[in-house]
Image (tube, helix red, strand yellow):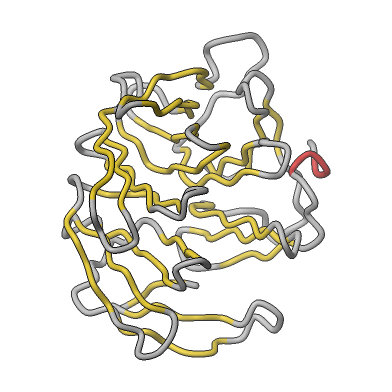
Amino acid sequence: MRWESQEIDIYDAATLTVQRHIAVPELGSRSCGLAVCASNKCLYASDFNNNCVHRVELLANNAVMKWSVAREPGGLTVNSENNLLVVSRDERKLQEFTTCGTLLQNIQLETVIEQPRGVVEVRSGQYTVSHEGSVHGVCLVDVKGGKAMVLHRHDGRSGSGLAVMNRPRGLAVDKHHNILVAENNRLLVLDHSLTSAYKMCLSIDGGLHGPYSLWYDKSRARLYVGEWKGRVIVVDHVKDFTETQG
């Protein structure tokens, strides 16, 4: 999938050819996150410009609805309960919504997470959040009772031999809870405790250029990497992120 000119293009996963275009009226020019929910047969797009999330039905008439969220929404993820998680950069919030837009949790993130950009569920109730600001990095947070506590951090400064991060954005997680981070012109693999880090080695013509979004399809062992300028890279036979260490 990709978004452009208030449309979302749907590609066939087997042939990688365009199948159809879905119009999303009022979708802003800066849509920083997409997420799909197979259970609810819908997709979500965050709207950085208009501080909202658009929900699109993937069956019948592709009906569209939207609701307001905290300012400057970025990354989205669907959790194990099939609810939508939205991270907001300006307000440093993690918000959980039902598929119809009912707010379930409105969680203020700790100050160490200055400008959150992406979010992914690692296991039930635990999320990794990428962030920028005075320090760029990722944090593993535990969400309980409407509060988020930072369990682990990786910013290239807390520990020996850890790589310094630069503009971390998209996140993905494999079956072993390893975390993949799209940042600068590389992909970085972290373990669940965020204590070890190494570069994922991919053979790509010209290398990576501004990897921004990630989607890991566990059922197909396939990794999708979206770059800032519009290219989508598809990597097959990725059983887990540790197989391509560098």
Q: Residue 206: x percent and y percent?
A: 67, 59
Q: Residue 89: x percent and y percent?
A: 27, 40
Judged left or right of residue 121, residue 206 is right
Q: Residue 84: x percent and y percent?
A: 38, 53
Give the total number of marks visible in the rendering: 0
Judged left or right of residue 164, residue 131 is left
Examine the rendered structure and indicate whether residue 156 appears above or below residue 238.
above
Examine the rendered structure and indicate whether residue 130 appears above or below residue 160.
below
Examine the rendered structure and indicate whether residue 123 appears above or below residue 15.
above
Nearer the observer, 177 or 196: 177
Nearer the observer, 105 or 210: 105
Judged left or right of residue 85, residue 226 is right
Nearer the observer, 86 or 40: 40
Judged left or right of residue 221, residue 19 is left
Nearer the observer, 57 or 2: 57
Task: State which quarter of the image contains the C terminus.
Answer: top right
Q: Residue at x 34, y 64 (%)?
A: 45
Residue 182 lies in quadrant: top right
Q: Residue at x 46, y 55 (%)?
A: 82
Q: Residue at x 48, y 38 (%)?
A: 168
Residue 55 lies in quadrant: bottom left
Q: Residue 27: x percent and y percent?
A: 24, 71
Q: Residue at x 40, y 53 (%)?
A: 83
Examine the rendered structure and indicate whether residue 14 appears above or below residue 188.
below
